[in-house]
């Protein structure tokens, strides 16, 4: 994969070891796949090692079944100085039919770090289409909402210590 690539899709089959007690793929397994795709996307964009800073707004829309072909798509939708907002979509299908259905979606924020683990700059992503502008604007709106939620959550954190 070349540096500066904005999007990536990981594909694999859901295995029996991914199943929860209800017989569907465990949400934790899906979250792991999301994190892997976010890392691959952010590393390809920045050309640097990246760490997960935030994963939020995760929506489990439909279950994934063992044997399903799973596609986890990741796309850069906003960049800060060292951070990249990555939109993630998870789709699944019976490999005999290949009729993809959305199962999960969310936003993940990745931060590029240097050899000492300190944040380091990333290339700026500039929207080129009307859809790109909408995605960027949505990422900014969500970022502002997270700041407000973070301030509210501080009241709860002191009780968890």
Image: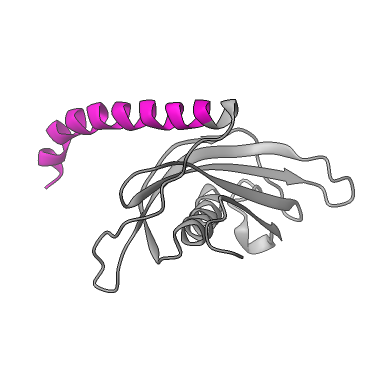
Q: Residue at x 46, y 64 (%)?
A: 47
User: What predominant SS class does the magenta segment belong to?
Assistant: helix
Is residue 142 a member of the stretch shown in magenta? yes
- Above or below, 43 against 93 in this view is below
Q: Residue at x 72, y 45 (%)?
A: 92
- Above or below, 18 against 154 in this view is below
Is residue 160 a member of the stretch shown in magenta? yes
Q: Residue at x 89, y 45 (%)?
A: 97
Instruction: State the image coordinates of residue 150 (x, y, percent, origin top left).
Output: 22, 34
Q: Using the image as rendered, state which of residue 36 and residue 69 is in the foreground.
A: 36
Give the number of marks.
0
Give the residue furthest to the right. 96
Q: Is residue 46 left or right of residue 9?
A: left
Q: Using the image as rendered, state which of residue 143 and residue 11 is in the foreground.
A: 143
Give the residue furthest to the bottom. 115
- Above or below, 15 against 154 in this view is below
Q: Is residue 36 left or right of residue 154?
A: right
The type of colouring in the image is one colour
Instruction: State the image coordinates of residue 134 (x, y, percent, origin top left).
Output: 51, 25
Instruction: State the image coordinates of residue 5 (x, y, percent, origin top left).
Output: 57, 55
């Amino acid at each position: 994969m070349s540096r500066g690539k904005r999007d990536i899709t990981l594909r694999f089959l859901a295995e029996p070891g991914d199943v929860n007690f209800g017989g569907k793929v465990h949400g934790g397994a899906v979250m792991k796949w999301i994190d892997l795709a976010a890392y691959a996307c952010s590393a390809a964009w920045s050309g640097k090692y990246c760490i997960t800073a935030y994963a939020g707004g995760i929506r489990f829309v439909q279950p994934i079944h063992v044997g399903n072909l799973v596609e986890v798509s990741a796309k850069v939708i906003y960049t800060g100085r060292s951070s990249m907002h990555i939109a993630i979509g998870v789709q699944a299908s019976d490999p005999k039919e290949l009729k993809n259905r959305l199962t999960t979606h969310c936003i993940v924020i990745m931060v590029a770090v240097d050899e000492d683990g300190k944040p380091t700059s990333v290339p700026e992503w500039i929207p080129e289409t009307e859809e790109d502008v909408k995605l960027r604007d949505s990422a900014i709106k969500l970022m502002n909402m997270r700041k407000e939620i973070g301030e509210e959550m501080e009241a709860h954190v002191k009780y968890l210590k």
